[in-house]
Amino acid sequence: MSLLALFRREFALGWHTSTDSLAQAGFFILIAALFPLSLGPSPDLLQQLGISIIWIAAVLSALPGFDRLFDADYRTGWCEQVALSGAGLWQYVMAKAVSWYCLTVLPLLLMTPVMMLILNLPLSCLGDVLASLALGMMALLLLGTISAAITLGARKTALLVALIILPLSVPILIFGVLAGDAACTNDTALQTPAHVYLLLLGAFTAVLLVLTPLAGQAGLSAALEERYKNEQKHAIYLFSLNAPAYVALLL
């Protein structure tokens, strides 16, 4: 089973069950609509806080789905089939991450110009804002993929995933906001250019692209091994309960 075949499967499943993606996109727009109401009719204040609002909305809309990333496939036995097929769990992990990015992050990027208009941000900096969001959300998605893999099968997965992602997402949030602010601010003589922060986001994302297949495969393998051990213990327990009946049948 190739990486492309796994991606097609994950994308098709996600496309037919796109309710979560639509909910995240709606939540993204809802946050942008609520901030102007709470801050009051102040265009200058909205422009000053606009990039931060966009990034907070993007991060908050992406967080809720990470704990369910591998849950359905783990419960239905698809993870075991991938492991037994010889395709490599790392390919499955990356196919899941890329399909999730296409289904959840790309709609947010398409709505970013609308967000910028709502928040009174100039569209002249749209390119840099989109680049920072594309890189930053990819890094955040890879962090979520790693977190979902290493917490698979644990109790209170949503809480564990949030505790792992939130501290690690702080650098992504900082560099993303700085890149957007640098691009949308006219006075470039007193600040670092936006491309510097974009390079930092790109480096962070590149490191995670290397770590995600390794950490994801290790997490899934550990979860499958633990599940196999629990099933063995359960089978032995059931056999011990029915052992007298088996002996009676033999006699």
Image: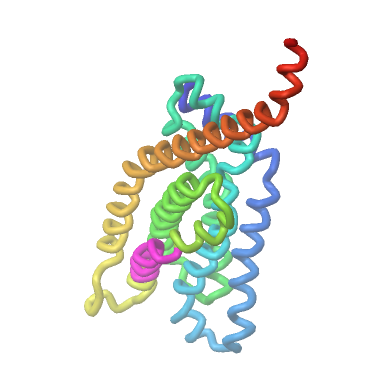
Q: Main secondary structure of the magenta part?
A: helix
Q: Does the magenta stretch include residue 31?
A: no
- Residue in the foreground of this view, choosing between 202 and 65: 65
Coordinates of residue 143 in the picture (x, y in percent): 42, 52
Identify whether 77 is placed above or below 59: above
Please give the range of residues in magenta. Answer: 166-178
Q: Does the magenta stretch include residue 177?
A: yes
Please tell me in which quadrant of the rendered image residue 235 appears. Answer: top right
Coordinates of residue 183 in the picture (x, y in percent): 35, 68
Q: Which quadrant is the C terminus positioned in? A: top right
Residue 238 as seen in the image, left or right of residue 210: right
Q: Which residue is drawn at 71% across and 17% down?
A: 247
Tell which residue pokes out farthest to the top in this image: 251
Q: Which residue is drawn at 40% across and 57% down?
A: 136
Coordinates of residue 222 in the picture (x, y in percent): 45, 38
Residue 236 as seen in the image, left or right of residue 52: right
> Would residue 2 be visible to someone looking at this image?
yes
Identify whether 13 is placed above or below 29: above
Q: Which residue is drawn at 59% across and 58% down?
A: 64
Residue 15 as seen in the image, left or right of residue 43: right
Q: Which residue is drawn at 47% across and 67% down?
A: 55
Identify whether 210 is placed above or below 251: below
Please tell me in which quadrant of the rendered image residue 240 appears. Answer: top right
Please tell me in which quadrant of the rendered image residue 39 appears. Answer: bottom right
Q: Which colour scheme is used?
A: rainbow
Coordinates of residue 35 in the picture (x, y in percent): 59, 79
- Residue in the foreground of this view, choosing between 95 and 187: 95
> Would residue 94 be visible to someone looking at this image?
no
Question: How many numbered circles are shown?
Answer: 0
Tell which residue pokes out farthest to the front in this image: 251
